[in-house]
Amino acid sequence: MAKTLIDTYLEPADGAACFVIIDSGIDDTYPVYEFHYVNIHPETDDTSFQFQVETTGTSYAQPMTTTYFQAYNAESGGTPDVGYSAGNDQANADVAFQNIAKTMGGGSGKDDESASGILTLYDPSSAFVKHFVATSHDYQSNASAQSAYVAGYINTTTAITKVKFMMSSGDIDSGTIKMFGVS
């Protein structure tokens, strides 16, 4: 598979950006789009990094059916765990933003508190529902390392043309999002 960098979105380190909207370049040129998010640092402690999509409007309220699976381990040693994260999933009637990294640390001056990962969106221009997979790793607010595996489908047969990334609380303090087309 060949990847083509379409665009790069940088967030300022001053906490001025509350979200990132990607509203160009998502069309039928590629069957797969990847969004690589690198060192996304929240302004607020104990918050989640999320996404939602849109077709032609600006409501970002497309219904999703999703799962959220995680593995984590505390810096202190504690008891590592692997399991399904109920409450971070959605049923078809839900139109909420989907968590792709949760309970992130956002402590001031703590550069290690961030999330990185890849959101893959399959065939967003098709006449079928739109499938996605996200794999993230983040430093949680409780000094734990977490890997998250999120998957699902967006229940629309209309072409997706926009993706919005945001924090569940507060702003995106800093980070980079790169959009790739995959052929």
Image (spheres, rainbow, N blue to C red):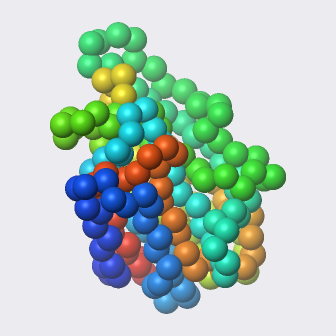
Residue 101, image quadrant: top left
User: At which x and y percent is residue 37?
Assistant: 34, 58
Q: Residue at x 39, y 11 (%)?
A: 79
Residue 85, relative to residue 101: is it above or below? above
- In this rendering, does residue 31 appear at all? no
Q: Quadrant of the N terminus?
A: bottom left
Q: Nearer the viewer, residue 2 or 97?
A: 97
- Left or right: residue 96 versus residue 99 is right
Residue under the point 53% across and 69% down: 163
Identify the residue at horizontal 46%, vertical 85% (top origin). Answer: 25
Q: Where 39 falls versus 36 (above or below)?
A: above
The image shows residue 28 at horizontal and vertical percentages of: 55, 88
Quadrant housing residue 123: bottom right
Q: Residue 87: image x %, image y %? A: 65, 34
Q: Residue at x 67, y 59 (%)?
A: 153
Q: What percent of the width, then of the height, locates residue 22?
A: 46, 74
Of the pair 57 and 84, the residue shown nearer to us: 57
